[in-house]
Amino acid sequence: MMQYIHILMVDDHPIIIEGYQNTLMATKKDNQTLVIDTANTCDAANLLMEKAANEHPYDVCFFDISLPPSADGKITSGEDLAKISRNKMPNAKVVILTMFNESYRIHNIVKEINPDGFLIKSDLTSSELAEAFHHILIDPPYYSSTVSTFLNKSVVNEIYVDEINRKILHLLSQGIKTRSLIEYIDLSMSAIEKRKKQLKILFSVTDGKDESLINEARKKGFL
């Protein structure tokens, strides 16, 4: 019986997507027909998901984490796209691919998205991508070795940056002053200041500067 599989691949490097496509097409089973759509930006991916949700939902969505934000600034990463996918196409398998391999970053993604597949690009080979794809179709989740190692470790203080904290970081990185954050976030100034203080502790910012916080958040893959 023929298995039709509708796939979305999102990465801002076309050559990487080409590699993924070639691997899946070369290793697909004889009874599988793969139809693959690709996008290099948040806006393009969002449009494809909107269309697919209304016509033929994706079976599997591959999202790179680091992507240029959408034109309106509302979609800032592959994480945001994954959440949209979960909302619009709840039956679609979500696969996260990223270069970030810090323990707390991995825990954050797992807690926020609970992906069906989670692959660290530095772990990835064509054979592992093929193995992950077929595993995810039948018995998700599939986590690459780095992800599994971090998740299996006992983390005493699990570090979690929620959606509001991510929005604070994003706005600060766009040059928005702290006093203006209340125009974008439905919190009091004292609550925003408290969150900023917690973020600075979280990212070990000792000089108290917003610029240092942004730099550290960017290094850790939150921007």
Image (tube, rainbow, N blue to C red):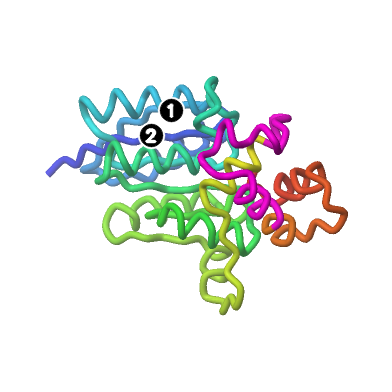
Task: State yes or no: discs 2 and 1 in contact (Cβ < 8 Å).
Answer: yes
* Horizontal side of residue 30 vs 110, given as left or right: left
Find the distance from the CA under tag 2 to the CA under tag 1: 8 Å
Provide the secondary structure element on which disc 2 rests: strand
As drawn, the label of residue 8 is: 2
Amino acid carrying label 2: it is Leu
On the image, numbered disc 1 is attached to which residue? 45
* Horizontal side of residue 53 vs 211, given as left or right: left
Q: Main secondary structure of the magenta part?
A: helix
Q: Quadrant of residue 8?
A: top left
Residue 166 percent coordinates (x, y): 58, 45
Residue 86 percent coordinates (x, y): 33, 44
* Horizontal side of residue 50 vs 103, given as left or right: left
Where's the C terminus, which quadrant?
A: top right
Foreground: 129 or 159? Answer: 159
Identity of the residue drawn at 57% across and 29% down: 69
Dot 2 or dot 1, earlier in sequence:
2
Provide the secondary structure element on which disc 1 rests: helix
Q: Quadrant of residue 21?
A: top left
Identity of the residue drawn at 31% across and 31% down: 35
Residue 210 seen anywhere in this rendered image of the structure:
yes
Identity of the residue drawn at 40% across and 43% down: 83
Image height of 141 relative to 221, above or below? below
Residue 123 percent coordinates (x, y): 59, 56
Identity of the residue drawn at 80% across and 56% down: 205
User: Label 2: how many residues lie within 10 Å, few (<14), some (14-19) or many (20+)?
Assistant: many
Q: Which residues are magenta?
A: 172-197
Asked if residue 176 is among those painted magenta in the image, a careful observer would answer: yes
Where's the N terminus, which quadrant?
A: top left
Which of discs 2 and 1 lies nearer the camera? The answer is 1
User: Label 1: how many residues lie within 10 Å, few (<14), some (14-19) or many (20+)?
Assistant: many
